[in-house]
Amino acid sequence: MAATYLVTAWLVLEVGYVLTNVLSLPKPIMKAIFGLLVAGFPLVTILAWNFRLTDAGLLRHPATEEPESFGDGHAEHHGGHGGHGASIGGVDPLPIIFGVMVLGALILLVAIKGFGFGADMAADIGHGEPAAVASAPAEPAALAARAVAPNSIAVMPFDNLSGDPKQAFFSDGLSEELRGALAGVAGLQVAARTSSNAFRDSKDDVTAIGSKLGVAYTLEGSVRRAGNVVRVNAQLIEAKTGFERWSQSYDREMRDVFAIQSDIATRVTEALKVQLLPRETQALAGAGRSASPDAYDAFLRGRQLFDLSGDESTYRAALAQFDAAIAADPGYAAAHAARARTLAVIAGQFDGAATIDTTNAAALAAARKAVALAPTLGEAQLALAYVLARTSFDLAGANAAYEAAIKTSSGNADALISYGTFNARVGDAAKGLAALDKAVALDRFNPRAWKALGSATYTARRFADAVPLQRQALKLSPGLAAGHYDLGLSLLMQGDLRAAAAEFLVEKQRWAHLTGTAIVAWKLGDRAGSDKALAALMAENGDTVLYQQAQVRAQRGDVGGAIMALERGLAAGDSGLLLLRRDPLLDPLRQDPRFARLVTRLSVPG
């Protein structure tokens, strides 16, 4: 009986595995069935030891068995524990056991599929993940049913074979330059840096990587730099088959590295049969780049530091590298653009009242210089748009720069995030959401992309839709700045005050924690708690959080105090006011004419 059970259980698992794939059932279901089968084995064994199935029904074994004959009469043995396939009291148990078990498994699978028990079971027998993650959809609607585009490609991080880990900035920089060049080709969809770099040390094969990134091809390679000589190997691989579509090796002097980049990008577009527009051909040839190896070297070092998103000293070190690049090549447009963005970040995050105006002026000058040197360079237009919006609230000028940038950077996820966020806040909301949705598709492992899409969905008043997007951002980066705050706001707007309070409680950004706590405490009737959080917000941050003060006061019904804080914030250049036009927290102010004037001032004209 034990042997019969084990064979039958194996058959049930085989059939169940096939049906699970055919019906697209959650994998934990088969784990549940396996657990039930394991639990049933000792039960069946105990029953078989104590009972036998006969024509008269289920009868208990006698306490002692009569000795069996060892002669030729063994064929007459009634076989209370007969071998596999033997009958018990004239009844063969195998068909009955097999039929009951298979029928039970089929009923369970159909019930799970038909009545929607799969999600609950998956949550109950998951892998010990936190409840917030386990209950979230595995793949938000932003990625549902996306087909892999035939001309989609991921540029993987090129291997640094120089023997010096400090040279990694160069191989990474080359990968990023190629990625940026290909992203400017309208006929290509290029996976962005964050997602591609997530597989730097992955053991997955190219097929698995292509599936996870949603691309048809990968561009892989290696870089060996020795003195003034560089060797680059590149291979274009079809993800579905793993076959190489194109490969090339280059041995050149450093001054020819830009020609290598241009040639690789051009060869890739030819292999994928993409027709280049004239401006795209010009971009691949290196418009806005530098012909100076020293300038390029300093630029790559500066970008590596900027991408660390560190403290003030890190940003100032990046600024020094961009200044060095410009000193080596004053016509280096990309370096001027990078300098502009770095200065804008320093002004917004670290400068005090005494220096902020000077820093903002330098950022604007650098951005205008970059555009003057290379009007079609997406990085230059993006830098100008960023500076205009955040330092002077010149939204008309910022909008024009964003539109110019997206013409040449429609495949660049970072550009799409900036462009989409700007439109979601102060411009065309539908256009902003579309851009952010595309950014997520190109950079599905980038928490910033998910955060931006979640925020835009929230400001569109689709609070329930925003929650899974914000949870996905936190799943990718549990320490994401203001990530729990964003999620808390979506829960707050749905009336789930306790859940919102829990999110605000674990938020690590102090200003966000205090803002959310002050609002939710007031709504829960804890006026003293709200007062305490608001007082701490003001005491710890002063006039740098005038916009957050306005949000709290608006939610507390203090219309006059909220508008006064907004007017002070506008005078002080608080960039938080870019949220004002569509911020749900400020809805209590929308009938006041003073607020209407602020909205008009902080919206894209026309």
Image: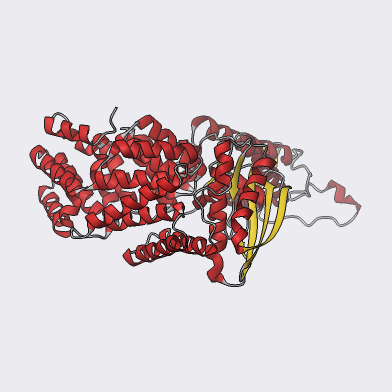
Residue drawn where x is 72% and y is 40% of the image: 93
Residue 334 versus residue 462 in the image, above or below: below
Answer with the quarter of the image where residue 598 lies: top left
How many callouts does the rendering have? 0
- Report the residue that reaches farthest toward the top: 606
Residue drawn where x is 53% and y is 35% of the image: 112
- Report the residue that reaches farthest toward the left: 560
| Left-right relation of 275 to 409 | right
Locate the C terminus by quadrant: top left
- Report the residue that reaches farthest toward the right: 72
x, y (%) of residue 180? 53, 48
Q: Is residue 466 visible?
A: no
Residue 311 versus residue 500 in the image, above or below: below
x, y (%) of residue 420? 39, 38
Nearer-the-camera pick, 201 or 145: 201
x, y (%) of residue 17? 65, 42
Nearer-the-camera pick, 526 or 295: 295
Answer with the quarter of the image where residue 188 lies: top right
Check the image and tell me how it is coloured: secondary structure
Nearer-the-camera pick, 471 or 175: 175
| Left-right relation of 444 to 474 | right
x, y (%) of residue 386? 34, 46
| Left-right relation of 427 to 65 | left
